[in-house]
Amino acid sequence: MIIAREATSADVPAITEIFQACYGAAYSDSRFYDPSALNKLVISDDTLVLVAEDNTTGKILGTGSVILEVGAYADLTGEFGRLAVLPEARNRGIGKLLMEERLRLVESRLQLGLIEGRTAHPYTLKIAERHRFTPVGFLPLKWQLQNRESIVLLARHFGNALELRKNHPRLIPEAYPLACLALERCGVRPDAIVDEEAAAYPAGNIYSLQELTTEGYAALLRIERGRVRNREIFGPMRLHYGLFLVQARKSRYLIARENGAIAGAVGFILDPAEKVVRVFELISLHDDVVRFLLSEMERLCRQEWQICYIEIDVSAYSPRMQRTLVEIGFLPAAYVPALVFHEVERLDAIKMVRLLVPLQVELTQLTPHARMVAETVLRPFKSRSILPRIAQVARELPIFGGLNTEQISRLAGVCTVSTFAPGTILFREGDVSDQLHVVLDGNVEIAIETTRRSVGFVSRGECLGELSLLTHAHHSATAIAQTEVETAVLDYRDLAELIRLRPDIGIQIYKNLAVGVGEKLKRADLS
């Protein structure tokens, strides 16, 4: 019989053996291979570590943990992590047993539980979803093991967490689709307000930059803005814990000085093994120091520290900070309802990510719910990589006619780019239309398959499938690439959502599409 129980110091060698068997020598968190560090986790009041034991043989077959109070507010948030089972003991219900025992022991102590599930091992995702954890984010290439791995973030609320949630977050458009999906998955009616007008923090004075020392600690602590009031960035550490505790946890602060006086600081944890930076606090005396600090931190990560991944938890009620981070290169990767407890209510937060390595991810092993979240997250990451390509030719494309620079950027931001080899069929006569193609390069033949008749060609700057998209009818012809063809692809759902949020863009798009259809019909009549 296999039982789950709390771990003791005597179990530390067996737990280390399990991690080595599951993760190999490349596991980046050295605490799980260091007996003294692992023993501290086992005996800590802030960490629950369980083991699964075969009580016939006494062999430890699996382990799981919960890190309690992971937030800076003692906010009843816990991270369910390190669920690992010896490879030879899998498929015996050990993971399910450890999950159920963890939930039994901690659910009265938590309002929110989080799980970071590896995409390389869907077992964790499946068992988490069976126990009512729901995917709320996808963190691309966050972990460094043998290779960089992506993480699915899952959440489960306990007790009255959602009743305490602050309503009506204010979001920039880039965060809205993910927020709606996460809220619905967590059983909350989406109530976010899209803020199209929020301006980013300005680029202002050039400040001098230095690391925090004891000399600057007292002066920085006296700046209330950002540290106490109207917090816009959240994390597991705060300056008021004390400088020496901050340093003991390997946290760092960059200080901005103006004429020798401290104007603000950004706090972060740098993990050189994972090549990850997590920002946890921003303190500012002036508006223009905010962008300076975040930009300098991002520059150092990119140019000097060889960081691959930066993560920031941003208030869902601070569209100005959200917009600033997007302009610096960050994108929404997770939306966590009721993540942070503040005063008398719980606040939603957006995990925003700056990815500094090429985006190469594999989604084949994800569960259906996790895949939907991952695709929602990845769409802006993919769009950002092709945005300069589309923007470069946008002025030449009739569908973008009459749009200003900001409107073009919004429309291009919901596009993806597809490439088709010669002879490839883009879509067939009779297919359901859910995409519009804008030809960026190459030539496409339009043919009626039933009569084997070519009816024309579409080239750079023209659209494919617009009539079917406008009328919701099946395609009336087949589109075949005659040369190598590159198209910007507008998905119907993305286009409809953009037009719902921005009717000004929708009016111009429909006008342009109608003109384009008319031109094609004229050419068809002449032929």
Image (spheres, grey):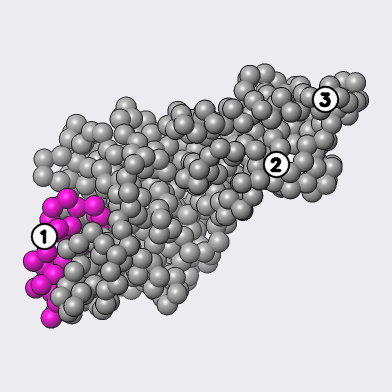
| Residue at (80, 39) in percent of width and height | 444
Q: Which residues are magenta?
A: 215-239
Is residue 63 visible in the rendered image? The answer is no
Amino acid at dot 1: Glu
Q: Residue at x 85, y 27 (%)?
A: 455
Classify residue 454 as left or right of residue 259: right
How much space separates mark 1 and mark 3, taking CA atoms?
A: 69 Å
Residue under label 3: 524
Residue 464 on image: x %, y %: 71, 33
Q: Earlier in the sequence, mark 1 or mark 3?
A: 1
Counting residues from the start of the chain, the first of labels 2 and 3 encountered is 2
The numbered dot on residue 294 is: none
Residue 238 shown in magenta: yes
Disc 1 + disc 3, Cβ < 8 Å: no
Q: Is residue 247 magenta?
A: no
How much space separates mark 1 and mark 2, taking CA atoms?
Answer: 53 Å
| Residues at discs 1 and 2 in contact (Cβ within 8 Å) | no
